[in-house]
Image (spheres, grey):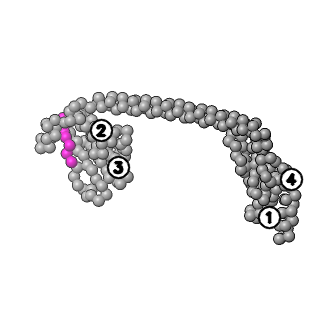
Amino acid sequence: TPLLGVKADAEAKALHFHSVSFFPYPLADSRLLRIPRNFGPYDKRKRVDTATCDVDHPLVCSKRPYRSSEPRDYDICKACFDIESLPEQKRTQKLLDIDKRRSEILLERRRQWEKQRREEEACWRKEEEERELAHQKDLLRFTKNIKEPSKAHTDENNRKKFTVWTKETHPKCDMREPAEFDSSFESLKEANLRVEYLFYYDNPWKEEKDDVYTKDDQLVNNEFRFLMTEDDYRQTYTVSAMP
């Protein structure tokens, strides 16, 4: 195998006969050169399939090697080769043109990004406005006495026909602990509205309606509103009405 390596080195050296002005060593056709030996002696791929251009002029570089120097581990693609082969004045102008084009592309991308950002912000603001409008419209269903019950409705010793109660639990508390009295009303409609208001708009976490996770929402006996939520720590908050 050492002899095969020496032979392969001699064959590769013979392929390096392309002299160029921009590189001090002769180059070879990348399609004819083997893959670097550290890939393994049985890897039959060519350098053109594994290496990438070292010059890498923006916008024009194709990455795929056209000429290479195996001893110097140097590769250059066809587009970059053509530019580097130009007389110095033309090469400089070509690179200036490329840089100008690159700046124009980056500027256009920036404009497009700014336009997209403005459109997304406008869409977000519109959604927020619509959400707030729906929020305010929904709140109109609740009268002042539903949102802030009077003393007559919060007197636990003189309850009216329908009672609204709340209960907060967590995994370590006694589940048999009784619910807390909130208020009472003469009509079932008012009691159910109070349940909804407490749950969605006056909950312990001060969450807005759209952000409240409703685990259970039902009418007990087809009459009494029952609402429950549960957080990631299995803490629950329940509001309901009862006779």
Spatial CA distance of label 3 from label 2 is: 16 Å
Task: Report the side of 210 relative to 45 (left or right).
Answer: left
> What span is colored magenta in the figure?
180-186
**Dot in front, 4 or 1:** 4
Mark 1 lies on residue: 42
Spatial CA distance of label 2 from label 4 is: 82 Å
Dot 3 crowding, Cα within 10 Å, few <14, some 14–19, many 20+: some
Point 69% across, 40% down: residue:
59
Mark 3 lies on residue: 230
Identity of the amino acid at label 1?
A: Tyr
Point 19% across, 40% down: residue:
183
Mark 4 lies on residue: 17
Point 28% across, 53% down: residue:
169
Quadrant in which the C terminus is drawn: top left
Query: Who comes first in sequence, dot 4 or dot 3?
Result: 4
Seen in the picture, residue 86 relative to 169 is either above or below; the reply is above
Q: Residue furthest bottom?
A: 2
Mark 2 lies on residue: 201
Spatial CA distance of label 4 from label 3 is: 77 Å
Seen in the picture, residue 143 relative to 85 is either above or below; the reply is above
Identity of the amino acid at label 3?
A: Glu
Task: Report the side of 142 relative to 71 (left or right).
Answer: left
Dot 1 crowding, Cα within 10 Å, few <14, some 14–19, many 20+: few
Q: Is residue 110 visible?
A: yes
Quadrant in which the N terminus is drawn: bottom right
